[in-house]
Amino acid sequence: MSVTTTSSGRLKRRTEGASPLGSWLLAGPMTLVLAIFLVIPILMLIVVSFLDYNSVQILWSFVIQNYIDALSSGTTYKTFAVTIEYAVITWLITVTVGFWIAYFLAFEVRSTTWQMALFLLCSVPFLTSNIIRTISWIPALGRNGIVNTLLLHLHVIHQPLTFLLYSKFAIILAFVHLDTLFMITPIFNSMMRIDRTLIEAARDNGAGFWRTISNVILPLSKSGIGIGTIFVITLVMGDFVSVSIMGGGQSASVGIMIQNEISLLQYPAAAANSVILLAIVLIMVFLILRVIDIRKEL
């Protein structure tokens, strides 16, 4: 590394002379971690998805029957459609809630101390397990739960609401509860980087609240929304615990389908569905990256 002086008189460090070996040594540990914990497991998953099997064991003969069975079944398409529906509805709610919470923390709370305190307050529930947080909804949403009891006492309803638990509503509610922070955090980070003089300039030129939001804040928060979208989509698409608990075993998802196949020792079939799920998620992430440049956050 050497130091030169630019035309403006500032000192500039050059790394042209850095040793290639040093660069490889810096990138080596991360490459090794990615290879062990990401690349190799995915390769093993793909290999297993092409293996044959019977009721008791995996047979070491390569076949494509697992993919034919998965892609020729109407149940598979319905299950993937339901899972994508969960992801889209959850995304719509979390991006709306997350955007306004992040906006409040970034622009309405003036004190940095209070910003951090409120942000940490939002993250407190995430110190507990996802399963515990999901199960905690059952006493509140049950037929004789807190919500139904309160509404009955207030004479808002005359009989308990049955759709609150073990339903699609309960599943979406659990997803929103579990994943909203993953939307708030990147949007909040994007908003904190917005130059406040841009907002003042918009207001000085007569832009109202909603026009400032749509023309200034929302475009400059797109990278955070993109990162949050990737988090929420990937978490919902791969989740099976929340669907199992809040759906009462009566709702389907790709995660539950894969879990059932594993419990029946149909590992190649489960691997094939996992590869299909991975491909769909990667396509969705690719489309998000085509629309939003998240490199601004990196």
Image (spheres, grey):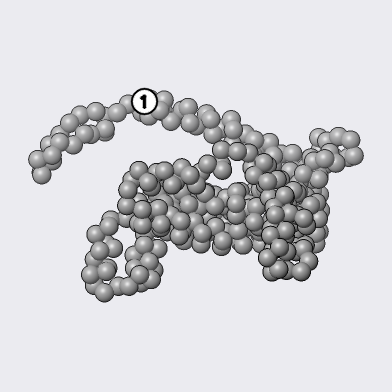
**What percent of the width, then of the height, locates residue 151?**
69, 63
Q: Looking at the rendering, in which quadrant would you find the N terminus?
A: top left
Along the viewing direction, whichever of 296 and 101 lies nearer the viewer: 101
- Where residue 253 appears, x then y in whole percent? 73, 54
Q: Residue at x 89, y 35 (%)?
A: 56
In-image side of 4 versus 89 (left or right): left
Q: Position of residue 118 (x, y in %)?
A: 43, 47
Q: Is residue 46 above or below residue 250?
A: above
Q: Residue at x 73, y 54 (%)?
A: 145
Name the residue at the bottom extreme: 206
Q: Looking at the picture, how far across and down is residue 270, in whole percent?
A: 76, 44
Q: Is residue 230 above or below residue 21?
A: below
What residue is disc 1 on? 22
Residue at 46 percent of width and 59 percent of height: 99
Dividing the picture into quadrants, the one containing residue 214 is: bottom left
SS at mark 1? helix
200 and 153: which one is in front?
Answer: 153
| Residue at figure coordinates x 32%, y 52% from the top left | 110
Q: From the viewer's perspective, is 124 left or right of 267? A: left
User: Does 115 appear above or below 143?
Assistant: above
From this view, report whether residue 143 is shown above or below residue 266.
below
Local crowd size for mark 1, using a 10 Å CA cut-off: few (<14), some (14–19), many (≥20):
few
Question: Total of numbered circles in the picture?
Answer: 1
In the foreground, 290 or 232: 232
Q: Report whether 224 appears left or right of 75.
A: left
Name which residue type carries label 1: Gly
**Image quadrant for the C terminus?**
top left
Q: Is residue 28 left or right of residue 200?
A: right
